[in-house]
Image (cartoon, rainbow, N blue to C red):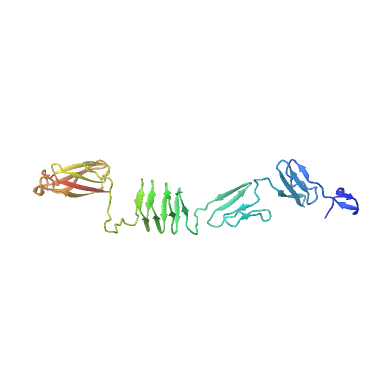
């Protein structure tokens, strides 16, 4: 150890005693150029309220180690488990792993970056909403216990099965099952979008299953309905609905014979279709296929398939 002679005292019983220099009181933190001090020298930054000790001088560059820190400065990190993480060789590592969050440091900032695909070893669970700007892909399952899985502009795509305990809601996009199944414990709601089965079918697999429409036209003014019922007048009726297109398939079925009885009934057919406006139902005379059965006043049910 090298002693500074100016810090030696003469006394009794030891004739020569080394006295370590007092702390340096400064208005700044020490620099690497502050080298003209013995190892172990204490430096107090009165402005920053921090303490430092000189621990090394190599190649005219000083290393001052922090020995006290201002409350609020970082000296440990506490994880979800395992307790506080202290520095090793003056450093706390925050390292990402493959397919997970990665980190990048610059100055006093640490940036956390999500990968293009997140691999969750268990379940990815959200209690409110899980929203994706593009695509969320699950190899096994995505579970929303009480909230929703919402795709504002993209798709919810699963190689296996998407199961909704309460509801799967597509506000503006689609719920698409390319090859697998979309299963809902109660209901599946598409507020503004479609429920699309690209390669599958709409299967009513249990007795009592049916197609239910909560909005059905009951007069010739059907609005935007695709289902309805009208009464013929003089063997014909023009149904006004914006749902009809030039290529619509319109299914007709007689609901009742009307006041004139069965003898007055004609043969039902679809007449002129005006896309987005209306379509005509005709009952043609059994005696003359070119003339309407003008006495046919039966009730006709109709359904449009687009």
Residues 247 and 30: in front is 30
Q: Residue at x 44, y 51 (%)?
A: 135
Q: Residue at x 18, y 47 (%)?
A: 300
Q: Residue at x 61, y 49 (%)?
A: 105
- Relative vertical location of residue 88 with respect to residue 272 in this rendering, above or below: below
In the rendered view, does 271 fall on the left or right side of 201? Answer: left
**Image coordinates for residue 140, horizontal then vertical, percent:** 44, 59
Q: Quadrant of the N terminus?
A: bottom right
* Whether residue 62 can be seen here: no
**Image coordinates for residue 70, horizontal then vertical, percent:** 68, 45
* Whether residue 301 can be seen here: yes
**Image coordinates for residue 5, horizontal then vertical, percent:** 87, 50
Q: Residue at x 87, y 50 (%)?
A: 8
Q: Quadrant of residue 28?
A: top right
In the rendered view, does 177 fall on the left or right side of 116? Answer: left
Residues 10 and 235: in front is 10
Count of all numbered marks drawn on residues in the image: 0
**Image coordinates for residue 114, horizontal then vertical, percent:** 53, 51
- Relative vertical location of residue 240 with respect to residue 195 in this rendering, above or below: above
């Amino acid at each position: 150890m090298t002693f500074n002679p100016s810090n030696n005292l003469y006394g009794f019983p030891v004739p020569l005693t080394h006295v370590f220099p007092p702390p340096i009181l400064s208005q700044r933190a020490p620099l690497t150029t502050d080298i003209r001090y013995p190892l172990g020298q204490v430096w107090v930054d009165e402005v920053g309220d921090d303490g430092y000790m000189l621990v090394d001088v190599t190649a005219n560059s000083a290393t001052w180690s922090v020995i006290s820190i201002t409350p609020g400065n970082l000296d440990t990190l506490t994880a979800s488990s395992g307790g506080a993480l202290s520095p090793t060789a003056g450093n706390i590592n925050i390292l990402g792993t493959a397919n997970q969050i990665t980190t990048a440091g610059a100055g006093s900032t640490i940036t956390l970056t999500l990968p293009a695909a997140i691999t969750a070893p268990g379940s990815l669970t959200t209690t409110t909403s899980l929203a994706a700007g593009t695509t969320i892909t699950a190899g096994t399952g995505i579970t929303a216990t009480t909230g929703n899985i919402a795709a504002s502009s993209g798709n919810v795509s699963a190689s296996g099965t998407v199961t909704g305990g309460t509801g799967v809601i597509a506000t503006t996009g689609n719920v698409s099952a390319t090859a697998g199944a979309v299963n809902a414990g109660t209901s599946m709601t598409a507020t503004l979008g479609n429920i699309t089965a690209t390669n599958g079918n709409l299967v009513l697999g249990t007795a009592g299953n049916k197609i239910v429409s909560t909005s059905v036209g009951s007069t010739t003014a059907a609005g935007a309905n695709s289902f309805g019922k009208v009464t013929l007048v003089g063997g014909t009726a023009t149904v006004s609905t914006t749902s009809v297109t030039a290529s619509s398939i319109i299914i007709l079925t007689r609901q009742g014979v009307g006041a004139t009885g069965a003898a007055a009934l004609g043969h039902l057919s679809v007449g002129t279709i005006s896309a987005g406006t209306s379509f005509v139902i005709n009952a043609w005379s059994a005696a003359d296929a070119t003339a309407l059965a003008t006495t046919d006043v039966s009730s006709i049910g109709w359904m449009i398939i687009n």
